[in-house]
Every structure is written in structure tokens, then in C-alpha cells.
Image: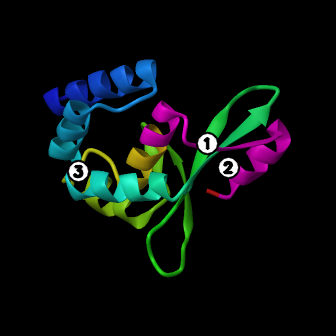
Amino acid sequence: MSACNSIAEAVWKDIKSTRSVTHDQLSILHFLFGKNFERATRIVDQRGVKRISGEPSGRCVFQVVGESRRKEEYFCFAEHYCACYSFFYDIVNRGEQLCCKHQLAARLAASVGACVEVNVSDEQLAILLSKL
């Protein structure tokens, strides 16, 4: 794990434990993620993050709204994957970013309790995930 990833993980852990974000934490996350973090905060402010949880397993996936005029929604696993174009182009192919704005929005919303919670059956969750 890179030093940037280690720092980011420590900040996310602190935010999650207190369910709030300090000015210093915001500054660190902005330094690490730049404009992607600014965009992610706008998505969270607009309540654009859904956490879809399967019952009874508790497994979950995030559905995060995009910022384009089409208002597309992307499924993502906050720490590992997003179905958006930027994830594949900037993160996987070019390695220029640590994560996309949708992943950041999912992590931020989950850490501060700002997700729209949606509960579905495990079968319904499996169907959703099969479309990825």
C-alpha cells in the first residue's frame, strides 16, 4: 500500500469513528484527491449515495449518482471498484488517481452516515450485481 493510501485509510477510519469531519481531515482528503474530492462532497450534499444492503446477509453495494446532465447512477464498492468510465480510464489504465469521485462519495457518505439506505433481499442484490 502506498503512503497516500495509508494516510487516506487513517483519515477514513477517524471520520468513521466520530461520524464527523474536521477541517484538518477535509484538508488532507482534498490534498490527496483534489477535484475528485470536491465533486464527491457535492454528490454527498445532494444525497446522491444509496447503500443497497441485502438481507439477511448484510452484504452491500453503493449506487452513486453522477454529475452529468443524464444523472447516471454507478454501482461501486467504495474501496475497490466503480462501474464509471473514469475508474477504468484514470485509475486502472493510467494509474493517475487513487479512486474516482463516486468511490469517494460512497466512502464519505458511509463514514458520516449520509447514505440513503435501501434494503433488498439477497436475491434482488444478486440480480443487481449480475448486471455489472
Looking at the rendered structure, which numbered label has been put on residue 97?
3
Label 3 SS: loop
Label 2 SS: helix
Residue to which mark 2 is pinned: 129
Looking at the rendered structure, which numbered label has been put on residue 108?
none
> Does 114 sit above or below residue 95?
above
Q: Residue at x 32, y 47 (%)?
A: 99
CB contact under 8 Å: marks 1 and 2: yes
Q: Which residues are magenta?
A: 108-131
Amino acid at dot 3:
Gln
Using residue 103 as the reference point, say whether residue 53 is left or right of it: right
> Does 53 sit above or below residue 101?
above
Real-space Cα distance between discs 3 and 1?
21 Å
Using residue 130 as the reference point, say whether residue 82 is left or right of it: left
Sequence order check: which comes first, mark 1 or mark 2? 1
Residue to which mark 1 is pinned: 61
Circle 1: is it few (<14), some (14-19), or many (20+) Cα within 10 Å? some
Circle 3: is it few (<14), some (14-19), or many (20+) Cα within 10 Å? some
How far across and down, in percent of the image, does residue 87 sit? 37, 56
> Image quadrant of residue 131?
bottom right
Using residue 91 as the reference point, say whether residue 53 is left or right of it: right
Q: Residue at x 43, y 18 (%)?
A: 17
How far across and down, in percent of the image, does residue 120 sit? 81, 42
> Does 78 sit above or below residue 37?
above
Amino acid at dot 1:
Val
